Amino acid sequence: MLYQLNRLNNLYENWLIQFSKLSISKLIILTVVVEITVTLIFSHLLFPNHSAGPSFENKIEEFFTAVVFAPLIETLIFQYAFISYILGKWSNAYLVSCFVTASLFGLSHFYSPEYVFKTFISGLLFGTLYLVIVKKNRNAFIVVAIAHSLYNFIGFCIRNLL
């Protein structure tokens, strides 16, 4: 079992290295497009009657919470702090760090089991983006916060402006 986990981690690390060859702007766009695709699959195919999620008093509160503060705080906690901590203890535990932080990210969004599962997938995407940017020796915190904020901004626009 440990051999299989190590092998999967090596495959994942190779995948991170391959993606690190892309520009940061392409990585952000790719992450946001995959996030939107996953959201559409969850919203329209898997759970079409699901409507749980955060609620806000008004659009200004929603904008600042979802688009500004949440991406910064969640990136700081779930990607920067937890991934850095895990990799500080086990330097090559890329896959484990991503799964642990994605699990915690999902559980922190407990509006419903479906929402936890969807945000777990989001956590995998943001965690992977974080690790790819780390492989590029760039500021992964800023890049992930921008991607997360952009995704939330698109959702905000769809919910409130269209």
Image (tube, rainbow, N blue to C red):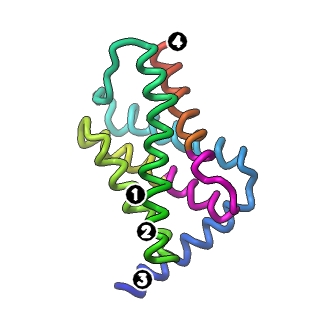
Residue bearing the label numbered 2 = 86
Residue bearing the label numbered 3 = 4
Labels 1, 3: front one? 1
Of residues 64 and 19, the one nearer the viewer is: 64
Separation of marks 3 and 2 at Cα, in angstroms? 19 Å
Secondary structure beneath label 3: helix
Residue 101 marker: 1
Residue 124 % position (x, y)? 46, 54
**Chain part drawn in magenta:** 125-144
Please tell me which of labels 1 and 3 falls first in the chain. 3
Q: Amino acid at mark 2?
A: Ile
Secondary structure beneath label 4: loop
Residue at 53% in and 39% down: 148
Q: Amino acid at mark 1?
A: Thr
Separation of marks 3 and 4 at Cα, in angstroms? 48 Å
Residue 156 % position (x, y)? 49, 22
Residue 161 marker: 4
Labels 2, 4: front one? 2
Mark 3 Cα shell of 10 Å, populated few (<14), some (14-19), many (≥20): few
Residue at 38% in and 12% down: 58
Q: Amino acid at mark 4?
A: Leu
Vertical placement of 12 versus 36: above or below?
Answer: below
Residue at 45% in and 57% down: 81
Please tell me which of labels 3 and 4 falls first in the chain. 3
Secondary structure beneath label 1: helix
CB atoms of marks 2 and 1 within 8 Å: yes
Labels 3, 2: front one? 2
Labels 2, 1: front one? 2
Q: Amino acid at mark 3?
A: Gln
